[in-house]
Amino acid sequence: MDRPSLTSQPYLQSRILVVDDEQEIRALLTRHLAYEGLKVTAAASGKEALEVMEEGPAHVVATDITMPRMNGLKLMEVLRERYPATRIVAMTGRTSEETIRACMQRGADACVLKPLVDMDEFVRTVRHSLAIHAHWEAILATVQERARSIGERPSQSGTGG
């Protein structure tokens, strides 16, 4: 079966950040996404992930939940606050309902369960998050274009939407 390419729009030039304290998992995911044509960066901790994001925000952050010092849930909170356009994919081996709800509450698009036995599922999840990112970017571009075309006047419609 042919694998769909991630090098077409909206995936061209997409930046993915993989965050996991387990080096083997980090390396596996990074290699797999790079093979799919994505620009991938890796971080071993939440703190390191935030440093990478300061250099240039990723479109999607795939983060483990259970990590020392700053866990993935805290990282998601900070990402939502500082980088609202960045999409989040949570990864966890803790399959409790509480953990899944915590991921949803912190704005994760999806949660991938470890062990990652189906890499295609992981890639599909990243694709989905990239599509959401592209959707929001397109809406922002449309709003900016409309503002330019009317001389950046505020909306007079009063409808609020």
Image (cartoon, grey):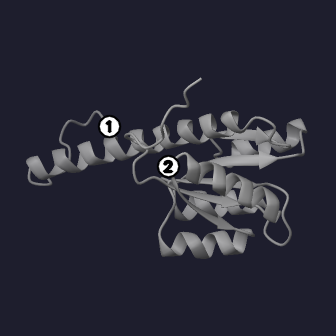
Q: Nearer the viewer, residue 29 or 48?
A: 29
Quarter-of-image position of residue 19: bottom right
41 relative to 37 in the view: left or right: right
Q: Nearer the viewer, residue 31 or 93?
A: 31
Q: Please state the horizontal and vertical placement of residue 82, each as a whole percent of the image.
A: 54, 65
Q: What amino acid type should be assigned to the residue bearing mark 1?
A: Gly
Q: Residue at x 65, y 55 (%)?
A: 31
| Secondary-structure class at tag 2 | loop
Q: Please state the horizontal and vertical placement of residue 58, each as a whole percent of the image.
A: 52, 60
Q: Nearer the viewer, mark 1 or mark 2?
A: 2
Task: Judge the density around disc 2: few (<14), some (14-19), many (≥20) Cα neighbours within 10 Å.
Answer: some
Q: Please state the horizontal and vertical placement of residue 47, each as a whole percent of the image.
A: 70, 74
Q: What amino acid type should be assigned to the residue bearing mark 2?
A: Gly
Q: Residue at x 20, y 36 (%)?
A: 157
Question: Is residue 27 at all visible to an observer of this figure?
Answer: yes
The first of marks 1 and 2 along the sequence is 2
Q: Please state the horizontal and vertical placement of residue 102, each as a whole percent of the image.
A: 78, 46
Task: Judge the density around disc 1: few (<14), some (14-19), many (≥20) Cα neighbours within 10 Å.
Answer: few
* Image quarter of the C terminus: top left
* Number of numbered labels in the structure image: 2
* Identity of the residue furthest to the front in this view: 1
Q: Which mark is residue 37?
A: 2
Disc 1: which residue = 160
146 relative to 47 in the view: left or right: left
Question: Is residue 62 at all visible to an observer of this figure?
Answer: no
Residue 128, compared with residue 52, is above or below; it is above
